[in-house]
Amino acid sequence: MHLEEELLEFDPKNITIVTLTDEEINEKYQKGELRIVTEQGRYPLQNIKEILGKNMELNPEYQRRRVWTNLQKSRLIESFIMNIPVPPVFLYEIEFSKHEVMDGLQRLSTLYDFYSNKFKLEGLEVWKELNNRYYSELPENIQKGIDRRYISTIVILNETAKNKEEEQILKKFVFERLNTGGTKLTDQENRNALYDGKLNKLCINISDNNDLFKNIWGIPVDSNPDLAENSLYKRMEDVELVLRFFAYRQLENIPGVRVKEILDLYIIEANNKYSDKVLSSLEKLFNNTLELAHGIFEDKTFVLYSKRKNGDFQWSNTPSKMVYDPVMKSLSKFAFDDSKKQKLINSKAEIIGKTEELFKENLVDFNGRNNNKSDVLRRTQLFDEIWKDY
């Protein structure tokens, strides 16, 4: 059962092989199709807070969450103290003298936090004497030395793209090329950069503010999650979990087999098509479905009941996507039916027993190796059969 105006139509562009003569290739190059126009610059570190505040869109969701530890931040500052070359930051000119960060968010965020006295230096290898000090506590000459340094920038000028559509294509290519080295971005980190929009923001909002969701997946609720070691949160995989719920409700209709293809196609369409009314309903749908799942399974929510080496079956200690996807998809049909929800919750002891039997009888379906579209649909049908009895 789908919400009003929830169903989308998917029409992915066919990939075709383009063949051109050398003459046509030369003509295409001369026309300057998607040829990037750049300029280089340098920002003095002592003015970095003012520059970031006035001229730059420093949005931590643009690429990824702030994943650097204090040790990594401190090493960057030590590089500036020693005048070790630091890679340039890549910016995109949104409008004249207004930029957004394409690559280098961690470096700029670190500098902003350093000059704001938000972290103490630690783990310095050459300048050990400066460990445990904020910027304001550094000796005068050290402060002056850092203030004299610059961070280099490469700005992709706004005139590169002829229109908004070409701008998005350009950003996609540049962003992907810039992130081929270093820490490989997760699929969801790429989505945040390339396919930002209303649905994407909703997924971020839910993952950040739903305390039950955080508790189930082990994400800190009260403390600053940026300081936590939860890799699910740091790599934005919690946001992808929310997206998976919405996308998998239309799994049968979405072209593609791999998870990445399915989620990419869905978020592109949903960002463009969904109204605020639909998005509000989807948020309620997610919250209600999650509450129902937890009402039934409690501490066993989205947990596997699997066979151990000694042959015994045992509940795992952590939730699994292989259980989360089919349970959420299957239970969402009851999200707005209070009577059916209560019947399921009242029968939770029997349902947990039947779930144990489900896992025992379908070991292959939950062994972690079967994760394409048909596998998710098959696992969803298994849970559908359980609810029928209640």
Image: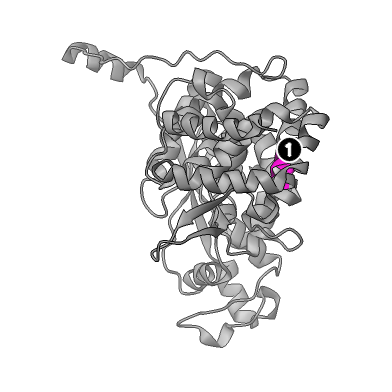
In this view of the protein, which residue sits in the foreground, 86 or 350?
A: 350
341 and 123: which is toward the camera: 341
Residue 122: percent from left, percent from top: 56, 78
Q: Nearer the viewer, residue 287 or 268?
A: 287
Q: Amino acid at mark 1?
A: Leu
Left or right position of 371 against 209: left
Residue at 70% across / 52% down in the picture? 298
Query: Which residue is nearer to you in this view: 256 or 62?
Result: 256
- The answer to whether any part of residue 190 appears in the image is yes
Residue 257 percent across, percent down from the top left: 40, 27
* Disc 1 target residue: 344
For image coordinates 67% across by 56% down, the residue present is 299
Most common SS among magenta residues:
helix
- The magenta span reads 289-294
Residue found at x 47% / y 54%: 306
Residue, far right: 338
Is 164 a magenta residue? no
Image coordinates for residue 238, horizontal then vertical, percent: 60, 47
